[in-house]
Amino acid sequence: MAKASTGLKMHFARSMLTHSLAWGDVWRVDFTFPDNDPGYGVDRAVCWLPPHQQWQLEFAIGQRIPPLR
């Protein structure tokens, strides 16, 4: 993730690590690109590790959701 963020010039903001029995460890991080308009929405990466499986990764771009606190 760090290597990708450097090449894309992503700036990481707040992040959150949680755990649930169904999803395992879940890491969420909000990020921005240098040329994003502030009213564009929230960009978020979510990584999770389900029990006995491999890490999963999803990017959500321009979501109409509140930023992480």
Image (cartoon, rainbow, N blue to C red):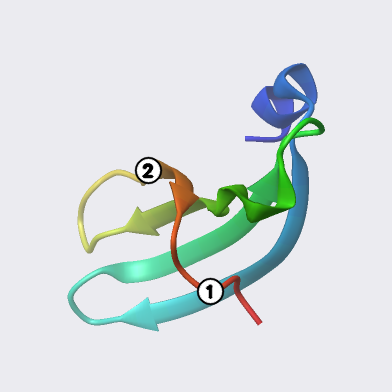
Secondary structure at badge 1 equals loop
| Residue 39 image offset from top left, x and y in percent | 64, 54
Residue at 81%, 33% (x, y): give it.
34
Residue matched to label 1:
66
Mark linked to residue 38: none
> Which quadrant of the figure contains the N terminus?
top right
Left or right side of 61 for 30? right
In depth, the one of 41 and 60 nearer the eye is 41
Q: What amino acid is found at the position of numbered circle 1 in the picture?
A: Pro
Left or right side of 9 for 61? left
What is the distance, in whole Å, between disc 1 and disc 2 at their CAs? 18 Å
Residue furthest top as drawn: 7
Residue matched to label 2:
58
In depth, the one of 30 and 38 nearer the eye is 38
Tag nearer the camera, 1 or 2: 1
Classify 10 Å Cα crowding around label 1: few (below 14), some (14-19), many (20 and above). Answer: few
Left or right side of 37 for 40? left
Image height of 34 relative to 66, above or below: above
| Residue 36 image offset from top left, x and y in percent | 71, 37
Count of marks placed on residues: 2
Q: What amino acid is found at the position of numbered circle 2 in the picture?
A: Glu
Secondary structure at badge 2 equals strand
